[in-house]
Image: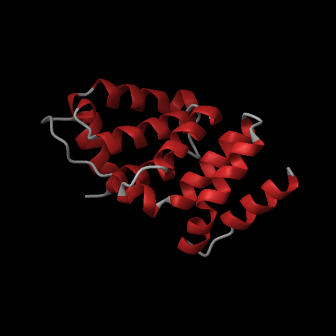
Amino acid sequence: RSDFELVRLLLADCPVPRRGITVDQLSAVMGVMLPFLAPDEIAPLFAQIGDSPCGKLLAEPERKWLALYRALAARRADEAGQLAAALLHTDHPAAAARTDYLLGVAVAGSLAEGDVQRAQALWREFGRQAVRERQDQLPDFLRAHLASRL
């Protein structure tokens, strides 16, 4: 089954309450939905997940990631930034594997709040990990954006 079908079945439809969704599956689905759906279009999905027995059984890491995606879907940059920063400071493997994503959200959220010092502190703490993990342009973009705020 696709990640989308699993997320829908195990979180939204929830025929049998159980914990069976991973951060990887949740991230794959949210990564393709969030950029394209308006907050009012995706809000019913988050309500359905939150109300389902399966949603209530999510383990702590999955609940934290779901909260992050909910904040991103609602376009609440400050809340998303705080949640991403908190996830960066965990030792969960999903956070370590997505340092670049979390750092981008945390830095953008800090800048949206006008907290340049916090954004720079996050970059100093986690920037090397983001650069090491991927060969994409996000670290360069963040570094340039932060440098323009000095």
- Does residue 70 sit above or below 92 in this rendering? above
The residue located at (47%, 47%) in the rendering is 87
Is residue 29 visible in the rendered structure shown here? yes
Viewer-closest of 119 and 8:
119
The residue located at (20%, 35%) in the rendering is 14
Residue 28 place in picture, x, y as percent? 42, 55
Q: Left or right: where does residue 60 sit relative to residue 111?
A: left
Residue 80 place in picture, x, y as percent? 57, 38
- Does residue 109 sit above or below 102 in this rendering? above
The residue located at (27%, 38%) in the rendering is 11
Residue 118 place in picture, x, y as percent? 69, 43
The residue located at (59%, 34%) in the rendering is 38
Viewer-closest of 121 and 98:
121
Q: Left or right: where does residue 21 sit relative to residue 116?
A: left
Q: Left or right: where does residue 55 sit relative to residue 115?
A: left
Viewer-closest of 61 and 124:
124
Q: Quadrant where the N terminus lies?
A: bottom left
Is residue 75 visible in the rendered structure shown here? no
Residue located farthest toward the left when viewing the structure as drawn: 16
Residue 51 place in picture, x, y as percent? 30, 23
